[in-house]
Amino acid sequence: MFQRFVHRPVLATVTSLVLVFLGWLAIGTMPVSQFPQIAPPRVIVAITYPASFAFISGLIPLVLASGPGAVGNRIVGASALGGMSFGTNFGVIIVLGLHFIFGSLADGRQLVREDSKVPVTEAPWAQ
């Protein structure tokens, strides 16, 4: 069955467009009044790394160097540029991702176990 679409790309495109058009027509007839009104989630992340961006931008001439000593300049520039790019990406993507993952794992869990509601100074063994 799928071989027909593989060997006839025009048929696959027309079928896809027909399905999209039918879905677009059907979206207006869906009964959404039974669902509650909810606000869509909003996440705003604003991060600036002016120092690392300036440093990375300053290394581009070293990476593109030519002439005498170009090999050394390219090696130093490429190494520093790669390291700073990795550090910036790690700080922006991985750290925030891990913060989100561990934060979602901790939701609903009590991180500090409370054995007793009685303050330590009023506990029977403290007197």
Image (tube, rainbow, N blue to C red):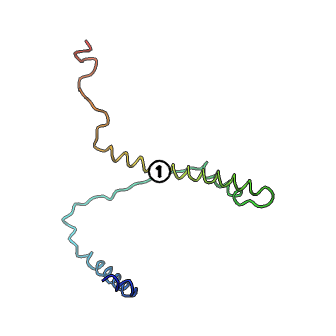
Across and down, in percent, residue 76 comes to: 69, 51
What residue did someone put label 1 on?
Answer: 94
Above or below — where is 78 with respect to 126?
below
Q: Tally the marks.
A: 1
Residue at 28% across / 41% down in the picture? 109
The quadrant where residue 6 appears:
bottom left
Give the camera-side residue of 38 and 15. Answer: 15
Residue at 74% across / 53% down in the picture? 72
For the C terminus, the quadrant is top left
Q: Amino acid at mark 1?
A: Ile
For the N terminus, the quadrant is bottom left
Give the camera-side residue of 58 and 9. Answer: 9
Q: Residue furthest left?
A: 34
Across and down, in percent, residue 17 comes to: 35, 82
Residue at 27% across / 14% down in the picture? 126
Across and down, in percent, residue 19 comes to: 31, 81
Mark 1 closeness class: few <14, some 14–19, many ≥20 residues within 10 Å: few
Above or below — where is 8 with respect to 95?
below
Q: Residue furthest top?
A: 127
Across and down, in percent, residue 79 comes to: 65, 52
Above or below — where is 120 with respect to 19?
above
Q: In the image, is 79 to the left or to the right of 45?
A: right
Q: Residue furthest right?
A: 68
Q: In the image, is 42 to the left or to the right of 31?
A: right
At mark 1, the secondary structure is helix
The quadrant where residue 30 appears:
bottom left
Give the camera-side residue of 29 and 88. Answer: 88
Q: In the image, is 82 to the left or to the right of 10?
A: right
